Amino acid sequence: MGFLFAGGSPDGVILAWKGGSSSTGEQQGSNPFQPAAALNGHTSAVISIEVGGGGKLFSGSMDGTIKVWDIKTLQCIQTIEKGHDSAVMSLLCYSDFLLSCSLDQKIKVWAATGEDGRFEAVYTHEEGHGAISMCGVEDMDGKPVLLCSWNDDSVGLYELPSFAEKGRMYAKGEVRSIKGGPGGLVFTGDATGLVTVWKLAAGATSGAAMAE
C-alpha cells in the first residue's frame, strides 16, 4: 500500500508525493516518491501539517485558516476560515480531536461535531503569550500530556483532556520544535540553536533538564 508525504510552501501550496512498498525505485537508484498533487487554497505560507485518522490531512497557514483534506482524493473538504486570529503554528491530532495553536495566544480543540462531520471548535485554552509548537506524549504514569511552547521561552505541560497545567520548562530561547522519546524523554530545539533533553518524572509537576 502506498503512503503520502506532504510539505507546505511559502506560497501557500501544499506539495504531495506518494510512495509505495515496491523497491523498484531503489533498485534503479531513482526517487521512490512520485509527485501526486499540488494542493491549492491557502493565501499565505503553510507552516503546519498533520495527518489524522479517517483519511484526513490538516494544514494550517500564516493566514489563520485551517484546511481539511481527503487523503484519497487530495481534495479540500473543509476550510475553517477563522481558525485563529494569527498564524497557525502547529497542529496535533489527539484521539478524535484536532488541536491547533497560534501566535494569537490560543490553543483550540476541534471535533467533527458539525453538519456532515465538519470540524467545529469545542474548547479554547488561552495564555498571555503566543504559542509556537505542540507535541503529545505520555508521562511516566502513562497519562496523556500535551506539551506546548510559548514565545516567552517556556514549554507548558498540560494534562489531557482537562488542560490542567502539570508544570513548565524554561529554555534559553523560543522552543521551535518538541519531540517525545522513550522513557519519559522530551527533546526541545530552541532559537539559540540548542537541543535540550528533558526527563519527565512520575508524579512530578515539572520537567527537569537532563542534558544539553
Image: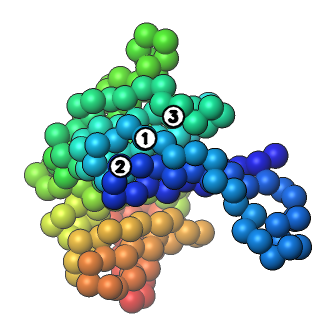
Q: Horizontal and vertical percent for residue 27?
A: 88, 73
Q: Which residue is tagged 3?
A: 69
Q: Are marks 3 and 2 in contact (CB under 8 Å)?
A: no
Q: CA distance from mark 2 to mark 1?
A: 7 Å
The foreground one among 130 and 116 is 116
Residue shown at the point (64%, 53%) measured from the top left: 35
Q: Which residue is tagged 1?
A: 40
Q: Amino acid at mark 3?
A: Trp
Q: CA distance from mark 3 to mark 2?
A: 14 Å
The foreground one among 135 and 31 is 31
Which residue is farthest bottom? Answer: 212
Q: Given this view, does label 1 or label 3 mark the residue nearer the observer?
A: 1
* Residue 152 sits in quarter: bottom left
Q: Height in image: 201 above or below 61?
A: below
The foreground one among 38 and 79 is 38
Q: Which residue is tagged 2?
A: 12
User: Which mark sits nearer the N-terminus, 1 or 3?
Assistant: 1
| 10 Å crowding of disc 1: few (<14), some (14-19), many (20+) | few
Residue shown at the point (68%, 51%) measured from the top left: 18
Tell me the number on the disc at residue 114.
Answer: none
Is 28 placed left or right of 174 in the picture? Answer: right
Q: Horizontal and vertical percent for residue 50?
A: 49, 47
* Residue 71 sits in quarter: top right
User: Which mark sits nearer the N-terminus, 2 or 1?
Assistant: 2
Q: Given this view, does label 3 or label 2 mark the residue nearer the observer?
A: 2
